[in-house]
Amino acid sequence: MSIPNPGRIEPVLWDDWHPVAELAALRHGRRLDTGLLGRPLTVTLRADGAIDACSGPHALPHLDTRYGFVWACLGAPVRDIVKFAAADEPDRIPVTGGSMAVAASGLRAVENFLDLGHLGYVHQGYLGEEPHTDIKPYTVGPREGGGIRATGCRVYQPRPSPADTSGYEVDYIYEVHRPYIVVLYKANPVDRTRMDLIALLLQPVSEESCVAHSFMSYPPHDVNEKSVRGFQQLIFGQDRPILENQLPKRLPLDAKAEISVRADSSSAHYRRWLSQLGVRFGAIPQAPA
Amino acid sequence: MIRLYDHELSGNCYKVRLLLSLLGEQYERVPVDLHPIRENRTAWFLALNPHGQVPVLDDSGFVLCESNAILVYLASRPGVPDQWYPRNDVQALGRTARWLEFATRLSGIISAARNHDLMQEQADIGALRSKARSLLRVLDEHLWFTEQAGRGWLAGEAPGVADVACFPWVMLSGEGGIDRLPWPAIARWTDRVKRLPGFVPMSGVFPASPGL
Amino acid sequence: MNRWFAVARGTEVPRRHVGHYLLLGQELAVWRSDSGAINAWENRCPHRGVRLTLGSCEGEELRCRYHAWRFASVSGQCTLIPAHPGQKPASTVRVRVFAAVEHDGFIWVNLAQGESPTAPTRVAHVLDSTRSIFVDAPLYAVRETLLDGYPVDSTASRLAVWSKDAYCLSAGNPDHAALVTFLLQPVTDFQTVIHGALHTTVEETARLARLRRHNAAMGTVRDEAERRAAAATGGGATA
């Protein structure tokens, strides 16, 4: 039995998996009333450890867990839950960063995650600072397996991670795997040959609201789960008021709707890719030519 | 040595960090993992504070919970200028106590609205926002008349713990979907607080440009 | 609409402050440059749409909070994009600005674009002004309530109020010497601000008491207008 889709939400989202709850929050007794793609959703953990989810009278047929989160599909899943190859290396330490609801389209949150120019201002003293504000050219293109990939993103950061006490120029790789799933790789401060992974998993609750779940995966060098989680919440807590003060709340896909510069190359690629994919939920589609 | 059991996103912890910074105090932050781990419900934390809430202050073994109590304690120590907690001026002291009570009302309502909007907690959000609006109207009115009388602070001639107690929850009201547009006198007061020497922001609060 | 509306008292927009106002549903960032120019801008950065009221006013420029793009007072032209500091921003990178002037103690804004706006109507002899009151009721409900009389005195009688035009009313004595002029600011279709201009002076010691009397009276008007608006829409609580 499938969930009714009266809004005719595009299959690329309806038939995909989305994160809907952090397992640790459920384990601590949480009955979660949330939403997905405009439908209500209630998630509970039963005493026997099984997870229940329903949308109104309908039990959710497709429910699974991965990376410390509960994932749901309202339609008929056409592919697996997103997988990050690096996170599956056996010695990796996974950390969930909590879930925060945001009164803005999740697509705005993805774009903000990709954005380099705000690091020195919104995250001043942590992920950037004046006068290191110029954004050097970087490369954006299609990602193998779908989505987009930005490489060669270099930013001077005064405190790139909770493990750091001094600043240096950091190399970033960004990958958008799905419309609402984005991940960032950066060199581990201890073992520069391996990458820290920070993923932002957006749960599209409505067109103008989302829940941002974060997942991190680190090589096994001095990972303090608590401080990593605290840092992530601090950083996202700085982004949230920006996201909630963007007008309009949905992401405009028309290139002329907002002025872009070269530093916004990943944003421009992301918006174009969403258009090509036919994503409408959470977006203001391009006007027909 | 002052130690603060703390969470970055807690408005009540921010009150204490703000006052410590305005007073130029060095202190150690001990982060308490609230989401999703609920370290505040573990035995070691409940031994510090049976209410299971941050912040908790530990000043060389003297342990104190409840943010307003911590503000009063910190501002009353010897060597701290009288303005922060005007214990020698009964009227200013009375007004300070009044605005500390107000801060408690405000934080109860705004934190519930914020937990609803941020943490997806259940609440009658319409009722909360309407109550917050009534409180902010009282605050705006008070601040407007304060300005007309040539002053800029909640309880007296100078900034004090009353301002520090109210500021975080006024600033975080937007995170509970509470609009501050109707209250321009509040907006000017928040600019004044942000321009105090030693002001520090928190996630969700932005600093002001330098004043003139 | 080619018409000027008072949105704030001039003294309530000090330098280095960015005021957040709404006029006819249009969000405004209102600020005064260090040299004194009054700006009323669309409250939205043209880059990524962030409200400019989150930003900061730094002399002759307003800086957006998100990427620190800077926009010049008066023109709204972008002067610096810190991601590309060596490049001069194109002339098309600018905030939408509205006509704004300050006189008679108020900041006036005209949302008309592409027309040459006429000067605002003068309010004669403004010697002081009341606290502006935000009302959760449409402008017509506020007007109707005011026209029933202004309850500024503790006596049961209310002062007569007469209408000068759709957005301006006066309250005064039986000989119609205006004691207070109400300037109505249509905020949205269901919200209104009442500004009050006073035409007489009192000694400084009596001034605060007088302002409190007006504030209480205007609060009574607000409560009544909100009650009427709620009754008219059949709802209980106000919006």
Image (spheres, grey):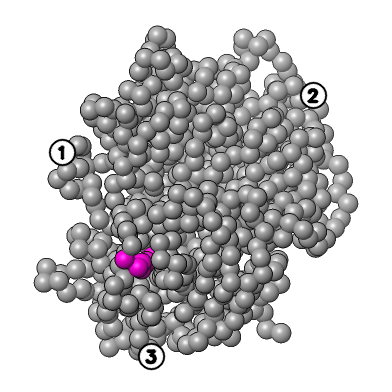
The kind of residue on which mark 2 rests is His
Depth-wise, is mark 2 or mark 3 nearer the camera? 3
* Residue A233 visible to the viewer: no
Q: Which residue is mark 2?
A: C125
Q: Position of residue A253 (x, y in %)?
A: 62, 75
Q: Residue at x 58, y 32 (%)?
A: B195
Q: Residue at x 44, y 38 (%)?
A: B168
Label 2 close to label 3 by CB (< 8 Å): no
Q: Position of residue C28 (x, y in %)?
A: 67, 49
- Nearest to the observer: residue A119 or residue A173: A173
Q: Residue at x 51, y 65 (%)?
A: A113
Q: Which residue is mark 3?
A: A78
Q: Which residue is mark 1?
A: B47
* Real-space Cα separation, disc 2 to disc 1, in angstroms: 67 Å
The kind of residue on which mark 1 rests is Ala
Q: Chain of mark 3?
A: A
Residue at disc 2, secondary structure? loop
Q: Chain of mark 2?
A: C
* Real-space Cα separation, disc 3 to disc 1, in angstroms: 51 Å
* Real-space Cα separation, disc 2 to disc 3, in angstroms: 73 Å
Q: Which residues are magenta?
A: A211-220
Q: Chain of mark 1?
A: B
Label 3 close to label 1 by CB (< 8 Å): no
| Residue C203: quadrant of the picture | top right
Q: Position of residue A40 (x, y in %)?
A: 34, 71
Residue at disc 3, secondary structure? loop
